[in-house]
Amino acid sequence: MKFGVQLYSLRETAEAKGAEAILKEVAEAGYDGVEFAGFYGKTPEEMKALLEKYSLQGISAHIRPEAVEESLPYIDALGIKYVFIPWAGTEEFETPEKYAALVEAAKKAKKILDGRGVVFGYHNHAHEYEGGNDYLGKITSDADLKAEIDVFWVTVAGKDAVSELRRFEGRLSLVHIKEAASEDPRGSAQPVVGEGAVDMRGVFAEAKKQGIPWAILEVEKYPCAEEEYLKRSLENMKKLEK
């Protein structure tokens, strides 16, 4: 298993210092690759050069279905092999017309990506489970998508992260590794990976059993300096993965 960082985790540093600064930070912390949430105003060629400079792999990207076609130059140039819908609001699931449009857009984007050998999937938050719903299961089934399960949001929704990974066996592409605080996880900073409420040992065991190639770290709120968090979390993930 290799380890990457969802660059949304470094959004404030990116805004203050630019894309190269965060790629350098990820590389120096020892990670193998990155997952994009936007391309920071760089051309595909410029971003490719930065990845090569810091020996990082472009793993995946969070892109809404309607923006996939315009993002193809980046997907192609950076060698991205996975694209995930980062968010669909509750109203997109609960309004029949909006849901039909979401599924249609997802199918169209998937067809384009299939032709390039790129996996298309959906990244969950907590609202897909609220009210007893299973919108993650619904959208992945209806649009024939893979899943990128975020174990933090599964935990916030009151579900067991390991059971959810197991439920999606065969449809699970990547795992978002995000730790949860024991109390008020939605509002608190995320502890260093392996030091919080998520059963990370079980998560990594299940991911390894399923042959998931990448663990993608994501952080909403840091409990310590970014550099320390990235390094300590990677150290712990490597131990958990063994």
Image (cartoon, helix red, strand yellow):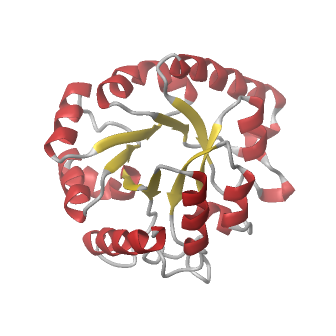
Residue 159: image x %, image y %? 74, 66
Placement of the N terminus among the 4 image quadrants:
bottom left
Q: Residue at x 80, y 49 (%)?
A: 134
Q: Is residue 25 above or below residue 94?
A: below
Q: Is residue 129 left or right of residue 48?
A: right
Q: Is residue 97 above or below residue 123?
A: above
Residue 16 visible here = no
Q: Is residue 122 left or right of residue 176?
A: right
Q: Residue at x 67, y 65 (%)?
A: 162
Q: Residue at x 44, y 38 (%)?
A: 61
Residue 100: image x %, image y %? 77, 25
The quadrant holding residue 72 is top left
- 21 or 143, nearer to the observer: 143
Placement of the C terminus among the 4 image quadrants:
bottom left
Q: Is residue 241 above or below residue 168?
A: below
Residue 91 visible here = yes
Q: Residue furthest left?
A: 53
Residue 177: image x %, image y %? 50, 62
